[in-house]
Amino acid sequence: MPMLYAAVVRPVIDRVHVSLRRAVRPEVKDLYARRGLTPGLEIDLYAALLDHPVPEAAVAARMVYWPFDPDAAEAPGLVERVDGHWRLTGPGREVTVEADKVFAATAERLWSYRPSPSMPGLAAVEAVLPLVQRLLEAGRVTGGPVFNALTPVWEPTDASPSALLNTRLEALRHHRADAHRAAWIGAGLTVDQIQALAPGPEREAIEEETNRLDAPVYEVLDDDERLVLLGGLGALADGLTDR
């Protein structure tokens, strides 16, 4: 059951994450542009970097699917490498704290939208938030190197439930990402090969292994709680107000 659940909940989590990232993009770009900057590594990892320095090896693994030049990432002066870790500079912390406020306000706007009385709106956020926190705690045992490097996430004392859910879901996604990297590396593939791999038995085997490695984190929830998590996240609006 946990393996099947891991497969089913993944696109639901991804939909919430991707839709929020898409919704904040114009305002975050404007926030940076007013400072003569463009978003970089610091915005990809802001939820972790606002809390603690992140090991360079974990960042390299996190960025394995994209061209990544550490020197270029460091050049704008928002992040720096110190003693084998990436950390925010003063200006980097300033801009990412402001970006976090954009994420929080946008999440509140999107997820409070109820085009139908059957949609729970922010009640769904309240329902799933403690469940996601339990998954993050369980992930300290079941997660891989990137998950463990990028948790815990920054949670200011005045953060709204929507703000907390945003950063906690961001962290939870790394649990599966670690599982996927382990699956294709275990199959003897390179990053170029996994990105080029077409649908078929080999791809299915890697996805099955990914589900197997991701599944243990969900064992901390009982069947009813898994349904609450799946249904609550699935009920969150994803930008209909912007169409």
Image (cartoon, rainbow, N blue to C red):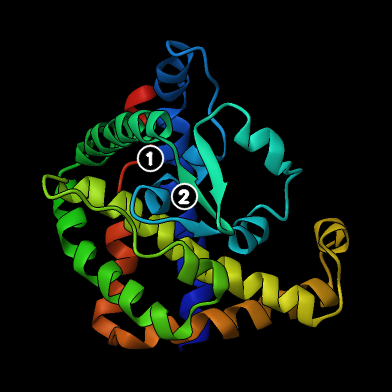
Say which element carries label 2: helix
Q: Position of residue 76 (x, y in %)?
A: 58, 26
Please give the label number shown on residue 238: 1
Q: Position of residue 142 (x, y in %)?
A: 47, 84
Please state which of residues 237 and 56 is positioned toward the viewer in this rendering: 56
Q: Amino acid at mark 1?
A: Asp
Q: Is residue 205 above or below residue 192?
A: below
Say which element carries label 1: loop
Q: Residues within 10 Å of mark 1 (few under 14, many from 20)?
A: many
The residue sitting at 44% across, 48% down in the picture is: 17
Q: Is residue 40 left or right of residue 202?
A: left
Q: Is residue 204 left or right of residue 180?
A: right
Q: Position of residue 117 (x, y in %)?
A: 15, 44
The residue sitting at 19% across, 48% down in the picture is: 156
Residue at the spot of label 2: 15
Q: CA distance from mark 2 to mark 1?
A: 8 Å
Residue 162 visible somewhere in the drawing:
yes
The residue sitting at 33% across, 54% down in the picture is: 51
Give yes or no for contact between labels 2 and 1 (Cβ–Cβ under 8 Å). Answer: yes
The residue sitting at 63% across, 29% down in the picture is: 75
Residue 228 visible somewhere in the drawing:
no
Please state which of residues 136 and 112 is positioned toward the viewer in this rendering: 136
Q: Amino acid at mark 2?
A: Arg
